[in-house]
Image (cartoon, rainbow, N blue to C red):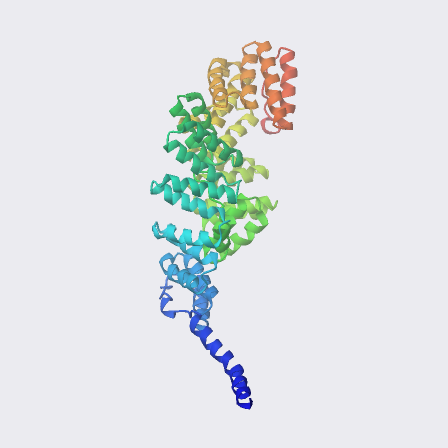
Amino acid sequence: MEVDYLIMNTMKKILPLFFALFLLQCTPGGDLSQMPATDLSNAEPQVKTKIEGLMQLLRENPDESNNWGRLGINLFVHGFESDALPCLQEANRLDPENFRWAYLSAFAYGEKGDERALDWYQKAQVLDPNYAPLYIKIGRMQLIRDQHDAAQRAFYQALEADPNLSHGYVGLGEIAFEREEIDEAINHLQKAISLNPEHREAYALLVSCYRKNGDLQKARLYAAQMEGLPKVTSLPEPLVNEIAKEGVSAYWYQLRGKQYVDAGLPQAAVKELEAALKIQESAETHNNLGIAYAGLNKPREALRHLRKAAAMKPDKVDFLSNLGAMLFENGNHEEGVAYIRDAFNLDPGFNESTLNLANYYQKKGQWKDAIAVYRKGIIADQNNRFFLYNLAWLLVTVPVKALRDSEEAMGIARFIGTKSDFKDPEAVDLLAAVYAEAGNFKAASDLIKDALKLAEGNDDVLMVNRLKQRESRYAQKRPWRLQADPYFSG
């Protein structure tokens, strides 16, 4: 009995040691041979410092998956994509249940155009079946391989994970179009637009669908609505957006700053863009900083940066236009118009400078010059709705009889109205002004009533007020007439 007790007691002491040794053998250790010998000689100093710090941290603790992952992320976002992959995969080997490492490995392969991305996306799918962007990536890769059934399943899975993801419906629309199921394609694409009215690819495919159906009017309508939209509709990527925050190069500060500018977050934009300037001075950064400071109502700082941007890139149309507009807004009219005119002369098809210059001439009562600006703009960009609309408006409302041309304006008004299927109150308003100029006040009044209903349906209070003023004028059988601004013309 005593011997049995001693044996049992000894076993209790040594079993935990054996168990610990067993776990140690089973737990994968980090393989430092996978750490890349990245050439950082041309990297920005702060990038080099950060990556070298992460490498040192990894050497000190190579068994920690997060150390491998963070190094991989930072190599990737700073342009060392090939060196990033072994780090991300080592992080995945050490922590195979972590979705992040599998997904980012797939993303890195995908950015290189490597077909191994699909395998890694499918591994990530097992770890987190609710991450919607993953299914869009899988679906698109399967579409490229002409695996339409598999791609269709992936897009439906994306919509199950996120019913508001327009990319899922665009993918389904593409598949239906390839199968010549045009009505189904149209249904999917219209759902995409209802979720995201700026999803350009949905409009482009709808144009193809309606052309295929022989409905050229609707094809023209969607082609017109597509104008001015971003060329690529970014896929919402929470995980990728998160890793972008790791970037410490001038490029990343500038990119994040621009994103904040576009999102209407000037305070956050200033912080990022000022950091970018400390690393590297660029005209683009100065221009974006100027816009951000303008958003903070700091005109002095805004003008300082916009002047630098224009001085560094005197042939950059948008830089000249932004500076001119800012000067004009702050009372420096002549200097501002000079920059706007320079921008217009460089590119009459550029919206902002052309519209601003024509508006300036209208305020001055220089009607002939305003008309000439729009005509040059239309030559540069024949389908520009703003130029066409404003030219037609001038041709029927300008106070100088010799400059009015209701026949030309009628052609433009009908063209614009047809593009919107006469559902745009501004297009209907324009047509009403043309009829009023031609003396047909009954038609003008009827059209203004239609425009009012459309504007009220859009809750456009300013437009409703303008239309009511014109309704009153046409009821008195008087056409609408523009007036110069006394402040500018006096």
Image vertical order of residue 334 relative to residue 58, above or below:
above
Residue 258 appears left or right of 78? right
Visible in this render: residue 471?
A: yes
In the rendering, at what x and y percent does residue 174 appear?
40, 35
In the rendering, at what x and y percent does residue 342 appear?
45, 36
Tally the marks: 0
Q: Quadrant of the C terminus?
A: top right
Image vertical order of residue 436 relative to residue 97, above or below:
above
Tell me the residue at 46%/73% (across/down).
Answer: 23
Image vertical order of residue 278 relative to residue 451, above or below:
below
Q: Quadrant of the N terminus?
A: bottom right
In the rendering, at what x and y percent does residue 250 appear?
46, 55
Visible in this render: residue 62?
A: no
Q: Which residue is at the front of the view, 123 or 457? A: 123
In the rendering, at what x and y percent does residue 279 appear?
47, 58
Tell me the residue at 39%/60% (across/down).
Answer: 84
- For the view shown, which residue lies furthest in the front direction? 1
Quadrant of res 441: top right
Q: Which residue is at the front of the view, 177 or 78? A: 177
Tell me the residue at 48%/17% (across/down).
Answer: 414
Q: Which residue is at the front of the view, 384 or 7? A: 7
